[in-house]
Image: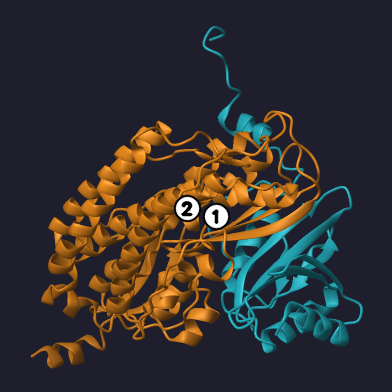
Chain colours: A cyan, B orange
Amino acid sequence: MEQREIILKIKENFSKSEVKVFDEKQFSVFADKDDIVRILSFMQMIGFQQLAIISAVDWIDEKKFELVYNLFSYTHIQQVLVKTKIERDNPKIQSVMNLWEVAQMYERDVHEFFGIEFSGNDDMRPLILHNWKDKPPMRKDFDSLKYSNEIYGTFKKSEEV
Amino acid sequence: MSEILTFMGMEDQYKKYELFFGPNHPGMHGNFSYIITVEGHTIKKIDPDAGLLHRGFEKLVEQRLWMQNISLIPRICVPEPDINEAIYSIAVEKLMGVEVPERAQYIRTIILEMARIGAFLFGFGGIGGATGLYTASYWTFADRDYLLDLFEWLTGARIYHMFILPGGVRRDIPNGWLEKLSETVDYLQKRLYEYDRLIYNNPLIVKRLENLGPVTQEDAMKYGITGPNIRATGIKYDTRKAVPYAAYDKIDFEVPVQTAGDGLARAVQKREEFQVSLDIIKKAIQQMPEGSVRAKMPNPLKFRVPKGDVYVKLETAHGEHAYYIVSNGSDKPYRMAVRGGSFTAGLVYAQKALVGMRIEDVALWMATMDICPPDFDR
């Protein structure tokens, strides 16, 4: 299928979604939070076999988290970014690990670094940050310099010591 | 006798053992660990445990200027650092709409292929190390040094080059460098036949690699296995062909495929791609055009990237390495997510594939699947 046909199919089934074309091999679909599992399973059905990455963006000024599901199709050679925004105060979204098993690790990763809850994904043991007590580090309001000063002490120049 | 022992062992509360297959194990690649539950020699359950190597690149990138990041990101992937600069530069160019001169595209292609050959040599050595054939790793590491010498001449650094920048490459090629590169390529071509005799026609290695963790085509697509490993299952897909970057659309090359998908097919696939990389370098040297090597870019300390986001992926020796970069129009990246080539294979697919294997196969499976811990701990 050409990119144009794929976009038409998405528009037919999900009239509320917005599509933005980046170039002939890449486009993004902005969907509603409640639609996300339906639209991803639809994409999987029309031949997007690979879930390349799940990542999150912290839009702190809007008080929103943006989740980006990056899919790739070996049949259509198309890269699609399926995006959705969720509230920053109560970040919660449905897990997609029933569609792609690899989502389990990506969701665990996003949970660890952004503190987003994925309902349906039970294994949220810390993967990288063991014994982490502060707020999730990839959030924009986490100050890494302040954190390291608190934990490891303030850095002094050699003359001051 | 062994059956009786197994029967007696059935009542044993210590029937199952937990084995920490971590950085202390000589077969482990880097600072990563698998917690393996074993029954005798057979693996029953596997639990990946990353985090010993985490350096927080995604956070650090947000605190530095667009140009400063060039010296930071090559450190994400250790065996093949140049791809990081290339992905980052291509992403910035796509967002800014910069056209890169043709000569710079060819120089990028040569650098990326040299890095790829270096990573393949690492991989050949890894297979040798995991099977006890240490001659292979000595030979390949020694040959990789010839490439590092060339890199040092071209860029001034041996491992992290920081040579590919947004807009092109840092400098033009010095006099006599291309001739020396041709000599090195001819030398590596000769050595490849030696590797065939040492590794790929070695009955012991063939016996160990055959039927080691076969991957089916469906699993490869579903679990996000990419690069040479997906081509070893028979899917003829190469990012260099499908979504061309640098000068790959101007260079004629054929993508080899295997069908079996097991450890031997994966190893042979890498050997075939080594040959392809040598051919690409030869053709790039022949076709190298004249001209400038860098497009006009704004002041590197002040330039801003327009608002937008882009996903750029490149073909590497261990799969598809990709960045998702978001810019909010300021002088620093707003967000950069890294997709390591072996993230899914090492963390998710391993939990399925390694069950039922023996302990001694874990290191070899990791070598043939190109599990690279910096991909998880970026």
In which quadrant of the rendered view does residue B73 lie? top right
Q: Position of residue B375 (x, y in %)?
A: 49, 57
Question: Residue, x 38% and y 40% (percent of image)?
Answer: B159
Image position of A93 (left or right of B5): right
Q: Residues within 10 Å of mark 1 (few under 14, many from 20)?
A: many
Residue furthest to the right in view is A16
- Circle 1: residue type: Ala
Q: Which residue is mark 1?
A: B246
First in sequence: mark 1 or mark 2? Answer: 2
- Circle 2: residue type: Thr
Image position of B336 (left or right of B272): right
In which quadrant of the rendered view does residue B169 lie? top right
Please, is residue A76 above or below residue B8 in the view?
Answer: above
Image position of B235 (left or right of B175): right
* Callout 1 touching callout 2 (CB < 8 Å): yes
**Quarter holding the N terminus of chain A?**
bottom right
Q: Tell me the subunit letter for badge 2.
A: B
Q: Nearer the viewer, residue A22 or B53?
A: A22
Q: Tell me the subunit letter for badge 1.
A: B
